[in-house]
Amino acid sequence: MTLHPLSAPPRLDGQVALVTGAAGGIGKATCLALAEAGATVIATDIVDDVAYEAAGIAYRRYDVTSIPETDALVSDLVAAHGRIDILILCAGTISHRPLGESTDEEWNAILDVNLFGVLHPLRALFPVMCDQGYGKVVALGSIAAKIGGVASGPSYVAAKSAVHGLMKWVAKAGAKHGVYASVVAPGPVETPMWQTVTQRAAPSPNGSVPLGRFGQPEDIAQAILFLCSPQSNWITGTVLDVNGGMLMD
């Protein structure tokens, strides 16, 4: 059994972090927060190129739904850096279709990115982290998984619910190897993906968010930073709600 260290200040100097879904919004804000804390960051997404001005951030095109691309990425990063200390899983997509209008094709597309896009890099890196005796994994969940949706459809709710459960399994299995796993579950955050929701039936922050505004990517990035930093060395298997008070457990 690994004797986990006491919680400590949030510096990540010397650590290597891999972030999926890093082209914009929460993923990009997270990369910047990790780099500012001292980590070497590899940002990934499906677009060809993303400009990062911050030192310590490299970008690589990567499709989380592809097992061959996953295997190649992990192999290359471990060969280049010797280890991967932090895995942040932000890749995601959303659907708004109600159940009666949904199709198998839509369900497959949503599950492919939101669930299997978490599973693929996690499955490849979990043994690496266990062998090295340390790792912190944070997946992006959603308030939708806890309350049955905000303005999203059932396929998105189901995928995010599965992510919440998967990360709890990883937390239990990984604890004895020094591997932590948790979820950050945002409420409405003003990102390009959320804009597709607000064009439909999004809540008003004045009527549904006690803190009076929608979230910003930086709000979620700082929560992710907390969970992958030494500040959280006695926390694993948690779902951290960051939603302006929309859900109070």
Image (spheres, rainbow, N blue to C red):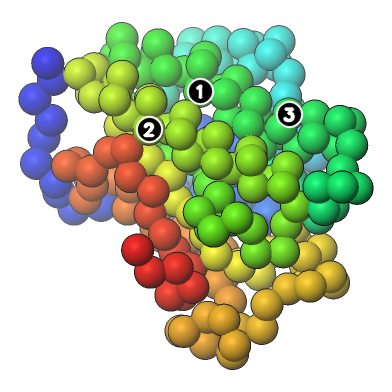
| In this picture, residue 74 sits left or right of residue 16 | right
Identity of the residue drawn at 66% across and 70% down: 190
Q: Position of residue 139 (x, y in %)?
A: 49, 40
| In this picture, residue 34 sits left or right of residue 189 | left
The image quadrant that residue 133 belongs to is top left
Identified by mark 1, the residue type is Leu
Q: Nearer the viewer, residue 111 or 9?
A: 111
Q: Which residue is mark 3?
A: 112
Q: Position of residue 170 (x, y in %)?
A: 38, 25
Badge 1: few (under 14), some or many (20 or more) residues near its Cα, within 10 Å? many
Q: Nearer the viewer, residue 243 or 226?
A: 243
Q: Earlier in the sequence, mark 3 or mark 2?
A: 3
Q: CA distance from mark 1 to mark 3?
A: 14 Å
Q: Position of residue 199 (x, y in %)?
A: 85, 72
Q: Residue 122 shows which numbered tag?
A: 1
Q: Which residue is mark 2?
A: 168
Q: Secondary structure at mark 3?
A: helix
Identified by mark 3, the residue type is Asp
Query: What quarter of the picture does the C terminus occupy?
Result: bottom left
Vertical relation: 52 (above or below) 242 = above
Q: Earlier in the sequence, mark 1 or mark 3?
A: 3
| In this picture, residue 178 sits left or right of residue 226 | left
Identity of the residue drawn at 55% across and 34% down: 162
